């Protein structure tokens, strides 16, 4: 089912492939098992691609097939020397140069857990694990080899990193149980050291000031979103204005879950749109949205000027981040620029 959600699931599919093939091979009726596996994947994993193809003719919509398969920053072909160097460097960069690989302020997204406790895989030699654990190790190895060669960002490797942490923790516990008092004390101290640095970073990344007011019941959920989410205020205005089935078009505000009707909501990101002006005009031609949500910056002012060449737009709401415009029914210039 994940294959129908985001195409980066290919990392998991490749690493699960050998395990699925082994399971099929162990079945008494291999062809039937393989056919059922393919049928389940097609039914649950390709549902949304089939829907996108039926509606748009492109199974990867809104991406192009080339971008969906290769990615916008496709890497050049790597020879074995550069690939080997990349595998050696990736653990270092993830631990000590996280700004380039981690989409949050911490320069050390992996902390120091693996640095301190990876030796446990050699020290706890008796902890070989059962077949399930060995399958997990195989999954992690294949996944990380493929992932590091393409997109070495930690968020795309959460599953194998968590599995490796759990398997490492098992070896820590077994080595701890068979060691003397001083060794056990040093293991506990090392674990406390990991927690000492990991917990504050996790709190910085995951906790914000409005959450304290929310949990102390000084503000409600909408109040929390109003303070913590810059895109919420403008969409809350539209939602409380009871605009019905009117079309809404937004620039740099894609929080569709908070729109009055997500089915009537369309957004674009200015940084990911090649010609924003033409996109705006095309939207006015095709959907004629009644409401526009624009950022309060030069991008938004530029879009507003472009809109006013073809339709009147009246500001009905603004906050520190976004402006809401209501467009008129009449078109000032029936022949849009470029027609």
Image (spheres, grey):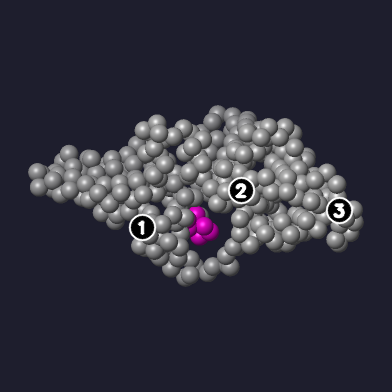
Q: Is residue 192 above or below residue 339?
A: above
Name which residue lies at 29% across and 42% down.
169
Residue toward you, 157 or 266 = 266
Which residue, given by chain and number where applicable, does mark 2 sit on?
A: 318
Name which residue lies at 63% across and 62% down.
298
Q: Quadrant of the N terminus?
A: top right
Residue extending farthest to the left is 181
Quarter holding residue 260:
top right
- Mark 3 to mark 2: distance in Å? 24 Å
Q: Are marks 3 and 2 in contact (CB under 8 Å)?
A: no
Describe the element under mark 1 as helix, strand or loop: loop
- Mark 3 to mark 1: distance in Å? 55 Å
Q: Residues within 10 Å of mark 2 (few under 14, many from 20)?
A: some
Describe the element under mark 3 as helix, strand or loop: loop
Q: Quadrant of the C terminus?
A: bottom right
Does the image show residue 261?
yes
Q: Residues within 10 Å of mark 1 (few under 14, many from 20)?
A: many
Mark drawn on residue 108: 1
Please indicate whether residue 330 sits to the left or right of residue 79 in the image: right
Mark drawn on residue 144: none
Magenta region: 147-153
Q: Is residue 90 above or below residue 37?
A: below
Q: Position of residue 308 (x, y in %)?
A: 78, 56
Q: Position of residue 299 (x, y in %)?
A: 65, 60
Does the image show residue 70?
no
Please indicate whether residue 215 sits to the left or right of residue 56 in the image: left
Which residue, given by chain and number where applicable, does mark 3 sit on?
A: 332
């Amino acid at each position: 089912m994940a294959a129908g959600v985001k195409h980066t699931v290919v990392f998991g599919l490749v690493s699960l492939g050998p395990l699925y093939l082994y399971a099929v091979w162990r079945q008494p009726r291999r062809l039937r098992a393989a056919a059922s596996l393919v049928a389940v994947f097609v039914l649950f994993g390709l549902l949304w691609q089939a829907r996108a193809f039926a509606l748009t003719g492109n199974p990867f919509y809104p991406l192009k097939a080339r971008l969906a398969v290769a990615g916008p920053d496709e890497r050049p072909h790597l020879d074995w020397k550069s690939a080997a160097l990349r595998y050696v460097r990736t653990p270092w960069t993830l631990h000590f140069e996280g700004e380039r690989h981690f989409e949050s302020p911490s320069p050390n997204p992996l902390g120091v857990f693996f640095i301190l406790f990876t030796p446990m895989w050699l020290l706890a030699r008796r902890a070989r694990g059962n077949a399930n654990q060995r399958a997990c190790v195989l999954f992690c190895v294949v996944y990380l080899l493929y992932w590091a060669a393409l997109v070495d960002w930690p968020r795309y490797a959460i599953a194998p990193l968590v599995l490796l942490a759990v398997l490492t923790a098992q070896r820590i516990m077994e080595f701890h149980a068979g060691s003397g008092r001083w060794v056990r004390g040093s293991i506990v101290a090392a674990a406390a050291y990991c927690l000492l640095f990991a917990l504050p970073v996790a709190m910085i990344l995951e906790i914000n000031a409005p959450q304290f007011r929310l949990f102390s019941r000084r503000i409600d959920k909408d109040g929390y979103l109003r303070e913590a989410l810059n895109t919420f205020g403008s969409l809350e205005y539209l939602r409380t204005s009871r605009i019905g089935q009117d079309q809404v078009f937004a620039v740099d505000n894609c929080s569709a879950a908070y729109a009055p009707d997500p089915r009537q909501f369309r957004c674009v990101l200015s940084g990911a749109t090649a010609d924003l002006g033409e996109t705006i005009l095309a939207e006015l031609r095709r959907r004629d949205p009644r409401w526009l949500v624009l950022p309060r910056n030069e991008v938004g002012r530029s879009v507003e000027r472009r809109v006013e060449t073809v339709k009147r737009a009246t500001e009905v709401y603004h906050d520190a981040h976004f402006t809401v415009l209501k467009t008129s029914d009449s078109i000032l210039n029936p022949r849009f620029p470029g027609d």
